[in-house]
């Protein structure tokens, strides 16, 4: 299961989906989805942006077992607090974990709710997400999920995204995270750091493609691992307040999950 914690020793990159062209003084629509990283854009006061994963499936075929983790309805609500800040709440209402032992063929299943993450994003520059925007986002994850679906203990960290809109077509983004992540076997926390680098291209005024690369170092006492991922995504905005998106991720080394597919969207209220 992928961990939420990441950090950048330098600036990293991930392209944000297309940003609506409304007056940034009155309205902003710039979803984090479907990127692996985050954006520097914040929601305007009085507005709520909801980002939803209808289905988020991941397969990890490493080790002596094959795990299929599927999350349904994973939702993030972003509430505008000031012109430069927003509050974020993320929750997974249902997740299933199917594990098959490669030696015996035995299959076990778990299901339940996931953890809850609360974050506060403060824009350091260009809160509308245009030009060269950046932000800082501390967060805490509460252990509301069932074992196997959630991490089993609280964790906390910080996210630092930097986004650069180079021109009407190309964008570049850097996202870093650092987390005091819950130990896999319980009883404490450890350092988890990662970064994402990506490049975005606007195929049309409403359709954006993103290519990304991610590296994560997880120093869990049960075993230190480094995961590398490659991802591609499409984000389509049929209206100025609606987005439908698709993300595909592939693991590039033995310690990484083999594959992940996410289908969802975002809405501005």
Image (cartoon, rainbow, N blue to C red):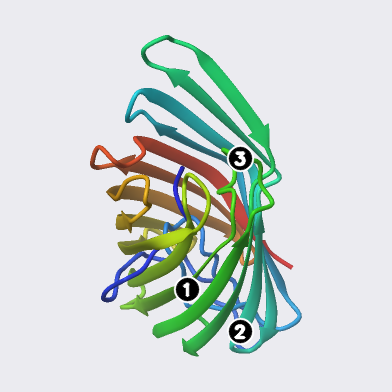
Looking at marks 2 and 1 on the same chain, the residue that comes earlier in the sequence is marked by 2
The image quadrant of residue 122 is: bottom right
Q: CA distance from mark 2 to mark 1?
A: 15 Å
Q: Is residue 205 above or below residue 247?
A: below
Q: Which mark is residue 149?
A: none
Tell me: 97 left or right of 12: right
Q: Earlier in the sequence, mark 3 or mark 1?
A: 3
Asked whether 230 or 151 is in front, the reply is: 151
Rendered location of residue 239, percent (x, y)? 62, 61
Task: Using the image as rendered, state which of residue 18 and residue 9 is in the foreground.
Answer: 9
Tell me, for residue 158, which label it has, or none.
1
Residue 85: which numbered mark, if any? Answer: 2
Q: Is residue 127 visible?
A: no
SS for callout 1:
strand
Q: Is residue 132 visible?
A: yes
Please provide percent x and percent y for residue 65: 39, 23
Residue 198 position in % (x across, y down): 31, 62
Q: Residues within 10 Å of mark 2 (few under 14, many from 20)?
A: many
Q: Nearer the viewer, mark 2 or mark 3?
A: 3
Determine which of the numbered discs, if any, sits on residue 147 in the image. Answer: 3
Disc 1 packing (10 Å; few <14; some 14–19; many ≥20):
many
Left or right of 51, for residue 246: left
């Amino acid at each position: 299961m992928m961990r939420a914690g990441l950090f950048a020793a330098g600036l990293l990159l991930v392209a944000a989906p297309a940003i609506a062209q409304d007056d940034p003084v009155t309205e902003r629509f710039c979803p984090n989805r479907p990127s692996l990283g985050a954006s520097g854009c914040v929601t305007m006061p009085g507005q709520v942006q909801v980002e939803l994963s209808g289905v988020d499936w991941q397969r990890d075929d490493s080790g002596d077992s094959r795990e299929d983790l599927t999350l349904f309805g994973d939702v993030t609500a972003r509430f505008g607090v000031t012109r430069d800040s927003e509050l974020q709440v993320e929750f997974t209402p249902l997740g299933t974990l199917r594990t098959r032992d490669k030696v015996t063929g035995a299959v076990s299943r778990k299901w339940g709710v996931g953890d809850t993450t609360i974050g506060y994003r403060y824009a350091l520059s260009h809160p509308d997400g245009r030009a060269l925007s950046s932000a800082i986002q501390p967060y805490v994850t509460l252990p509301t999920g069932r074992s196997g679906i959630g991490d089993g203990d609280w964790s906390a960290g910080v996210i630092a995204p930097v986004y650069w809109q180079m021109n009407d077509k190309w964008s570049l983004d850097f996202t870093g995270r650092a987390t005091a992540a819950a130990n896999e076997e319980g009883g404490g926390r450890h350092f988890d750091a990662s970064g994402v680098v990506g490049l975005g291209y606007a195929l049309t005024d409403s359709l954006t493609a993103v290519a990304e690369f991610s590296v994560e170092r997880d120093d869990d006492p049960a075993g230190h691992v480094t995961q590398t991922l490659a991802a591609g995504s499409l984000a389509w905005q049929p209206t100025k307040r609606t987005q439908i998106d698709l993300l595909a991720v592939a693991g590039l080394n033995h310690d990484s999950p083999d594959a992940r597919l996410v289908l969802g969207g975002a809405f501005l209220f």
